[in-house]
Amino acid sequence: MRSFIYKSIIILICVILIYEFTIGKQIAMFKDRADSIISKEGRRESVNKLRDEINKAINKERYLSKEDAILLNKFIKKIQNEISEADGKDLNESKTQED
């Protein structure tokens, strides 16, 4: 009976340790992130970080590489063409064509 109790206690301690070092840490990290998003101070901090990154981007001579700029330009032109084609169509007509 004694060995059963000792084994049970050891297994319980192992389960608790495994939980704390795996799932417990993940839950704590998620909770910390959620708290920083929910709190006013966390939102202010996020906005300030975003402003800093925007200022860094403005101060750079070239933010995008030439390849990225070409790719984005082609993508925007494609979207503009699709939007201009959709301007003349009725909403109901476009839904029937998609089906």
Image (spheres, helix red, strand yellow):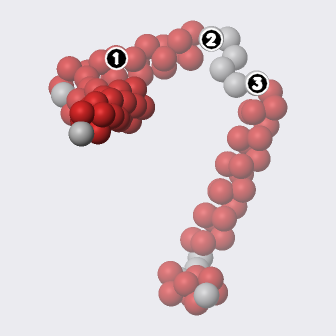
Q: Which residue is mark 1?
A: 48
Q: Which residue is mark 2?
A: 60
80 sits left or right of 21 in the view:
right
Which quarter shows the N terminus? top left
Question: What amino acid is at disc 2?
Answer: Lys
Closer to the N terminus: mark 1 or mark 3? 1
- Residues at badges 1 and 3 in contact (C-beta under 8 Å)? no
Task: Say which residue appears at 57% left-offset and 9% top-offset.
Answer: 59
How packed mark 1 is, by other alpha carbons closer than 10 Å (few <14, some 14-19, many 20 or more), is few
Upstream in sequence: badge 2 or badge 1? 1
Q: Is residue 32 above or below residue 48?
A: below
Q: Which residue is rendered at x = 72% and y = 56% of the image?
A: 78
Query: Of helix, strand and loop, which one carries label 3?
Result: loop
The answer to whether 79 is drawn above or below residue 86 in the figure is: above
Asked whether the viewer can see residue 33, the reply is no
Q: Check disc 1 and report its element: helix, strand or loop.
A: helix
Q: Name the image quarter holding residue 62.
A: top right
Q: Residue 87 at x, y = what percent?
A: 57, 71
**Residue occupying image coordinates x 67% and y 11%:** 61
Question: Circles 2 and 1: CB distance less than 8 Å?
Answer: no
